[in-house]
Image: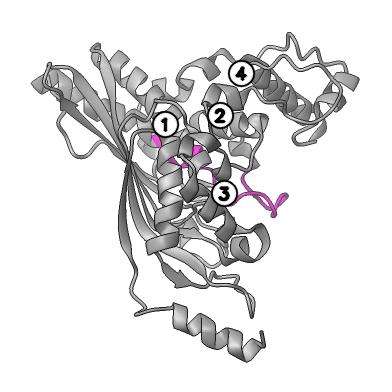
Amino acid sequence: MKMEERIVEQLGLRGDGKIRSLDVHADNLAEATHKAIIACHDKGFRVETPKQQPGMTLGYDADIKIAVENPDAEPKIYTFGMTEDGRGLMQYILEVTHGIHNHWKKDKENPNRWGYTYNERFTDQIPFVLQRIKQDWDKRKRISGRDYQFAIWRAGEDIIPEQEDPPCFQLGQFRFVDDSKGNLIMNYQTEWRSRDLLKAWNENNIAQIELMKLFAKKISSVIEEPIGLGVYIDRSSSLHLYGLYVDRDGLEEKIVQMKKNPYTENSMTLGDYLTLPPDMDSIPWQGTIEAQKRLIAAQSDYEAKTSSLNASRKTLIDNGYDLDNFQYPKEWDTWPKAWNASPDRNKLARVFNI
């Protein structure tokens, strides 16, 4: 097809130029990923990406709100929506929940590193959220506030041209509701400006649900009452499937396959996925979540000594690391120590040079 014909064809796909707003409901995260991909493909509007090249297929895009009724239910992994291996996913979870790579944020010495980390953005706010919840509970014996939230966006860092890739995650909010049996239920709502639906959404929300579970455990400790998990609601102003995935990765064929088969045929439990080997070599693999944490802890130790990031298992073993017994921080099994800190207002106005 000639370039001129291609441009005319693409123009016809654009429709009325209005953003589509969609709602998706699912029982678990894998089902939500499956349904969201199909909904965006079938009902989204067509648009180029900021990095669109001439002749590239237009992507699919929509404002989508996704409600996961049972966020801790399995399966959580939809394999069409994953790119990381088990180690990479475990590392990402710990980045979000415990900030293990907050120091990877770029500075003058490392200008090519990340412009932000989610954990670094919200950690200083959590003691204030917990304080507000505790005060409401002590005063009223209920936590029905609509202001238990934390923000990610920092105008001083994110609106300026130097921030080429500002954060996608924007806001997290907790809502507590009593059920019909009088049990206290925590619901978690997140707002995002932009997401890659095929390669990021599932991974993002695996970490968010792990964060949700830690928040519920910590808040339960603060008010000394049991807290159950409610719905997880995720809203993205732009949830998209890139045109590149059509041209390069056979997205249209995948969509056909997804519609033919139940989502469970392309799903896995989180535990099974996290225990997958982190790299393909002949070194025996224990295949446990704890083994992944030991590996990541050893990588962090090796990084501190050599500045080498994400060293392979072979490199670590060759340098004397006993990966079967290497200790990882025990707080990785519970909430971060930073959440136990007293609220510090001086930390809330920090703006970093990037």
Q: CA distance from mark 1 to mark 4?
A: 17 Å
User: Residue tagged by mark 1?
Assistant: 209
Which label number is shown at residue 199? Answer: 3
As drawn, the residue found furthest toward the top would be 325
**Marks 1 and 2, the one that precedes in the sequence:** 2
Q: Residue 134: within the magenta?
A: no
Q: Residue 107: within the magenta?
A: yes
In the rendered image, the quadrant that contains the N terminus is bottom right
Amino acid tagged 4? Ile
Amino acid tagged 1? Ile
Vertical placement of 99 versus 32: above or below?
above
- The residue shown at (30%, 21%) is 219
In the rendered image, the quadrant that contains the C terminus is bottom right
- The residue shown at (47%, 59%) is 240
Do labels 4 and 3 touch, CB within 8 Å?
Answer: no
- Majority SS type along the magenta span: loop
Protein image colouring: one colour
Q: Secondary structure at mark 4?
A: helix
Q: Position of residue 195 (x, y in %)?
A: 48, 54
User: Residue tagged by mark 2?
Assistant: 94
The magenta segment is: 105-124
Q: Mark 3 or mark 1, which is nearer to you? A: 3
